[in-house]
Image (cartoon, coloured by chain):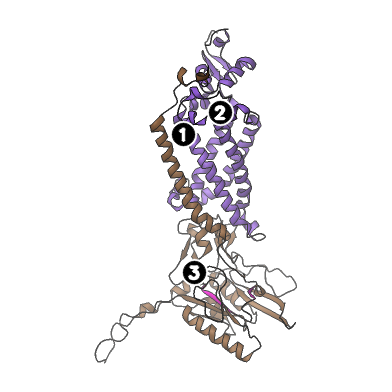
Amino acid sequence: MSSNIVVRHGTDLREDEMVRYTLKERMCHWLAGISYLYLLASGLALFTPYLYWIAYILGGGGTIRFWHPWVGLLFFVSVMWMHSIWKRDMKITADDRRWSKAVKNYVTNRDDQLPPAGHFNYGQKQFYWAMFWGTLVLLITGVLMWFPELVASRAHWLMPIMVFLHCTAALVTIGAFMIHIYMGLFFVSGGLHGILWGRVPVSWAKAHHRLWYEQMQRDDRSRISSSSFKPGADD
Amino acid sequence: MSNSLLEIKAISGHRGGTPGKGVSRDYDVCKLVDTTTCIGCKACEVACLEWNGYEFRDTTFDNTYQTMPSTEWNFWNLIKFNEVEDDNGNLQWLMRKDQCMHCEEPGCLIACPADGAIVQYTNGIVDFNQANCIGCQYCVTGCPFNIPKFNTATKKVYKCTLCSDRVGAGLEPACIKSCPTGCLHFGSKEDMLNLAHNRVEQLKRETSHKNAGIYNPGDPNPTPGMSSPGSIGGTHVIYVLHDKDKPDQYSLPADPSVPFFVKLWKGPLKWLGGLGMFLGAAALFGHYVRYGPKPVDEATTQGRAKE
């Protein structure tokens, strides 16, 4: 059995590759991602008449009104799961603050003038927290909007505020989501590959998340494929 | 009202042109409820159920004449009973027919996201089209009178249609037809306002209700003797009240308006949100064209410049 594929954390690694995301992390990410896409499409259909055609594609207005809350619950569960996995990784550190001061260099591809980032850079963490808090607001307001007939008879004044907050929180997450999609699909080459199959080249890790790469070198060599175990194999 | 179907084209034995040719009276319909002559007999409740084909609901007995606390999805017309003391300490037993007010600026229609689920006719009737209703109940959120009601079985919302089916055929609404005291009237808004004003004058002249008046919330051109609180542009159901300044005594809202947050959501938020998404996408595209994807090489490896 001499194969040059090493399996680590549910991820196939070839030479000079690293585990960027474990299988669990990927599953969690895509559960959140796919449910969010449905919520986005069905929510936008109800947001403006110009996008109500989406409702017909998704089975009609009554159908999306039925599924949107259920998929919303699924999204909430996936975000909570994600929180249990990434909560510690998402803490804003002193390194992040240094990085954030030089964010202009990141946006303009002058990464050599950027302080090194950890497993997640400051922008990714900001996206995470926007989504996390947005999800909490969307959940609370959404549950009330699920059964307005129960709320309206007792506290009619509450419903317009709930709908407004739901809409506002959704727009905030949409703004963050658009940037996320742009980064993953277009701006950061290799990023999508990483979140799909979990592996990134060691050179990619060093280029984009150097602190994380160095930490993996020290603490968790199980994330790095065998060839890079050799001393002096990098640099 | 179908009078427009009966425009005069020609008349017999008449010298010269045809008088009235091409003339049609364009008017809004209106229901006038005179609370001072309502006896709470609930005939209008029964007529409403009969015409619209609903069975009488189970009533809730609370030691008063109140049939049930509020209108329901299959009970669109409800007499509200209120016992209040007037300024002289005299007991007043007030009865008011509660139903959809058919607002000129309908909060339900403004809030509704479903294409064609709520229709406002030029004659003022606001009608729900259940075939297009998706059951989200945003209309419940937008209504200042708590009128639209959800049917949990059909997942659709229902309310008084002002008998749009009867009115379209030139008939008056079923409730009007059944009223034994003549406290209910139906006609053009102009005529109903005139009738209401005459009644108010009579009440002031002949009774102790010196502050009698008309409840016509949000009317942009209020006349003396009319109470027009709120901002819903007038309603196509108006009331004569014993005291026009105390609508809450009749469980009528003192300040009916489309909720502020509904306006904010359906107005600025919708446009700013749409504009933001559009400009955001454009900005991201512009960024891609200017800078392109991040290359992975030594020159773009973080922190190299400082080494």
Instruction: Using the rendered image, report if marks 1 and 2 lie on a common chain.
Output: yes
Q: Label 1 to label 3, Cα distance in Å?
A: 45 Å
Residue under pointer 3: B104
Q: Residues within 10 Å of mark 1 (few under 14, many from 20)?
A: some
Answer with left or right where residue B63 lies relative to residue B31.
right
From this view, report whether residue B64 is shown above or below residue B37: above
Instruction: Write the start and end of the magenta stretch as one range.
Output: B235-247
Please identify the quarter of the rendering in which residue B76 is found: bottom right
Query: Residue at label 2?
Result: A99
The chain letter corresponding to purple is A
| Camera-nearest label, 1 or 3 | 1
Check the residue under mark 2 and report the chain it is in: A
- Circle 2: residue type: Trp
The N terminus of chain B is located in which quarter?
bottom left
Give a yes or no on whether discs 3 and 2 share a subunit. no
- Which chain corresponds to the colour brown? B
**Residue B122 visible somewhere in the drawing:** yes
Which residue, given by chain and number where applicable, does mark 1 sit on? A182
In this view, the residue in front, B208 or B3, is B208
Mark 1 residue element: helix
Label 3 resides on the chain identified as B
**Circle 2: is it few (<14), some (14-19), or many (20+) Cα within 10 Å?**
many
Callout 1: chain: A
**Quadrant housing residue B12:** bottom left
**Alpha carbon separation for disc pair 3 and 2:** 56 Å
3 vs 2, front mark: 2
Q: Nearer the viewer, residue B18 or A15?
A: A15
